[in-house]
Image (cartoon, grey):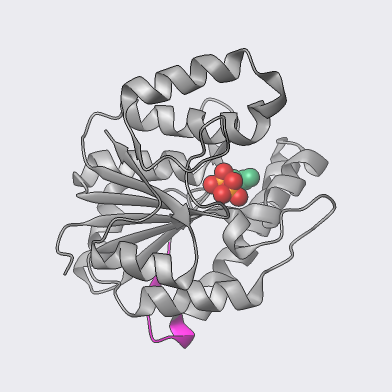
Amino acid sequence: MRNELTILKIGGSVITDKSEGAYEKLKEAELKEVCRAISENWKNLILVHGAGSFGHPHVRKFGLSSLGASKVHLGCLRLSERFCSALTEFDVPAYPIHPFLAYTAKIVEKALRNGFLPVLHGDVVMNERIEVLSGDDIVVHLAEAFKAGRIGFATDVDGVYDLNGNVVEKLDRTLLEKMLAEIGENKGKEDVTGGMLRKLQRLYEMGHKCSAYVFRGSYENLKKFLQGEKVGTEVII
Ligand code: IPE
């Protein structure tokens, strides 16, 4: 049984094909499995999803001028629409929130209070200039704002890997620092592992402590995570 407020990010690679050349390619079967797992346990949950091939290729192709950002955002919007429609097919009252328009913890809180499942996503945002806002940053922000009890990152890998290719069961700050230092000297692996570890580094900078998990976004794993069980790599913050 899970009571504490939980934030779950579904990485873009779980629900879209992010391989070279893929453009707005949805993984329909995987999306359904994700929605099925969520539909079984979505109370007290905030959902965030990545942009996958509905966002990253657009940033590369169109850039972040106002016209570029407009196109990037519309791509993200199309994925949000597909995801939220799929959730409603499973009787989940999805409440889509688009960071490009504006999002605040207050809007998210209002949606929760009214019985919705808030669904946010990686997007473009207007700060001093137009920039890309990753779903991971949204998770960190909301975890702080809501003092979340539990956060999860569903990805297309089994967890955080060490440099020998094994999934780490528990990752603490000391181990993370050590791995980051090793990656610095190990350029070949920087892309895959480096990206993930640097994302995790943000968790340690967060002004709030809670349990966090990185795991493969399969139906079984999502079900476990949403039930309050351990799954994948546990990040000790
Ligand atoms: C990226 O969001 C947003 C854009 C590219 C506009 P994420 O960083 O959360 O997306 P994924 O999970 O890597 O696909």
Query: Per the image, is 84 magenta?
Result: no
Q: Is residue 59 above or below residue 22?
A: above
Which quadrant of the rendered structure holds the N terminus? bottom left
Counting from the top left corner in percent of width and height, residue 106 is at 25, 51
Residue lying farthest to the right in this orientation: 21
Q: Which stretch appears magenta?
A: 88-96
The vertical placement of 223 against 159, above or below, is below
- For this rendering, which residue is in front, 9 or 95? 9
Q: Residue at x 41, y 65 (%)?
A: 221
Question: Does the stretch in magenta take in 94?
Answer: yes
135 or 213: nearer the eye? Answer: 213
Q: Quadrant of the C terminus?
A: top left
Res. 96 image quadrant: bottom left
Relative image position of residue 189 (x, y in whole percent): 67, 28
What is the quadrant of residue 12 in the picture? bottom right
Residue 26 image position (x, y, % from top left): 68, 68
For residue 123, say whether it is visible: no
Which quarter of the picture shows residue 165? Answer: top right
Q: Give coordinates of residue 90: x percent, y percent.
A: 43, 85
Q: Would residue 155 be visible to someone looking at this image?
A: yes
